[in-house]
Amino acid sequence: MLFDTNAKQNLYPLTQTKAIADIRYGIFSIKERWETISGLPVFIQAENYLAGLYEAPPDDEYLYIDASLKDEDNLRSQILSLQPDEALRDANGIIACRTNSLIDNHIFNKPEKHFTSFREAENIIRLQYPWQLFLWNDEQLRKDFLLLFARSMSQPLPETIKTSQPENIIIEEGAVVEHCIINASTGPVYIGKNATIMEGAMLRGPIAICECATVKMGAKIYGATTIGPYCVAGGEVKNSILQSHSNKAHDGYLGDSIIGSWCNLGAGTSNSNIKNTAGLVNIFHEAYGVNVNAGRKFGVVMGDYSRTAINTALNTGTIIGTCCNVFGEGLIPRIVEDFTWGIQQSSNYKFEKAVEHINNWKELKGEKLSSAEISVLKYIFDRRF
């Protein structure tokens, strides 16, 4: 059972529409990674307004795990070895615990009343900010590749592709990979089930092209990059993560960035990922209302269901909220709030129109907004307005 902590509010805007466990970096989402590691079904315990998105767990023994934990081999073994009514904790709270009953998140504030035994841990790293995802992606891609390499065999590499260090390439069943260049000497390359790598594409690892994703003709994809399930990638992409069902299908640059699910970057959209001064990038922290140093390279973090018009110019360190329609002249402001329509004379996205437009995009990929998803969007909309 993966549970959210206060870290969720720090990961704005990515976790407005999903639990932390649904965030993808490396090859897997956090939930998928724990399923692969443990070999067991994994459930998600989320905030009340998100609960309708997730399946209720059956009656059983539960291993609760903080979803924001950075993946570390030693920590994995400590967590999986916990005994019933035993908890692992550090100075910041419960890391993991094993119990015979479902528990609420408030119990983690006073765990001594619920658990009979504790183990203490040190030097635990948790997700605190969204930009950590692209900073950690290189390391996580390599770890996830080793997880898969131990469990599966690659399909034969097609004769029409040019490769370096083909032993570092996994191509899953159903993938179509023809007349492209894959350089795995700089890091492993994973191509998921039914993915398509079109002719002339150039991939330089570490990279994950996940299930049913498409890399367009002539695309240049540098590591460390994750193209999530059902995403489309074209143009130039470097050290970025597209979560799922999102499109960056045309020319333009995307670097050191995180794009949420069901987003679309119009043709020619490009972001700056470094200041002209090469100075530190300060990001406004939504939860605490202060600026936080994010390092020297930071492109854009875009929340789910947001879109840019053609030739949109995104400034260094831009945060775009949930369900925004971004268009306007010149550089886009560095903060675009949830449900924004336009930039120069911005107005609010009407909720009914927002739902209609999201459904239009979903229909292009054979899906439709669920009532639970609409409820989540309405919660976010009402909280702002």
Image (spheres, helix red, strand yellow):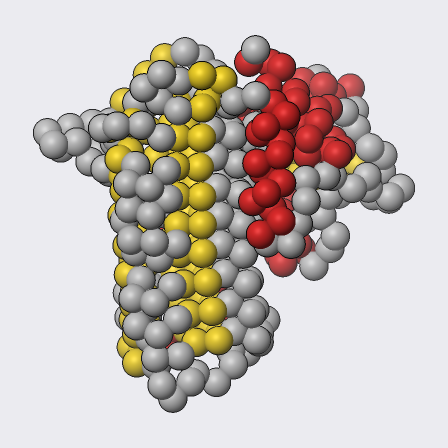
Residue 103 at x, y = what percent? Answer: 79, 28
Residue at coordinates 75% horizontally, 34% vertically from top-left?
371
The C terminus sits in image quarter: top right
332 or 220, which is in the foreground? 332
* Left or right placement of residue 238 versus residue 280 in this view: right
User: In the figure, residue 181 lies in which quadrant?
Assistant: bottom left
260 in relation to 223, above or below: above
Find residue 314 and report its image quarter.
top left
From the viewer's perspective, tell me whether residue 257 is left or right of residue 297.
Answer: right
Q: Position of residue 247 (x, y in %)?
A: 45, 50
Query: Is 346 left or right of 28, judged from the image as shown?
Result: left
Q: Nearer the viewer, residue 272 or 156?
A: 272
Closer to the camera, 294 or 324? 324
Name above or below for residue 178 compared with residue 287: below
Q: Is 213 above or below relative to 128?
A: below
- Residue 210: percent from the left, percent from the top? 51, 60
Kindly tell me whether residue 37 is visible in this rendering.
yes
Residue 113 as seen in the image, left or right of residue 129: right
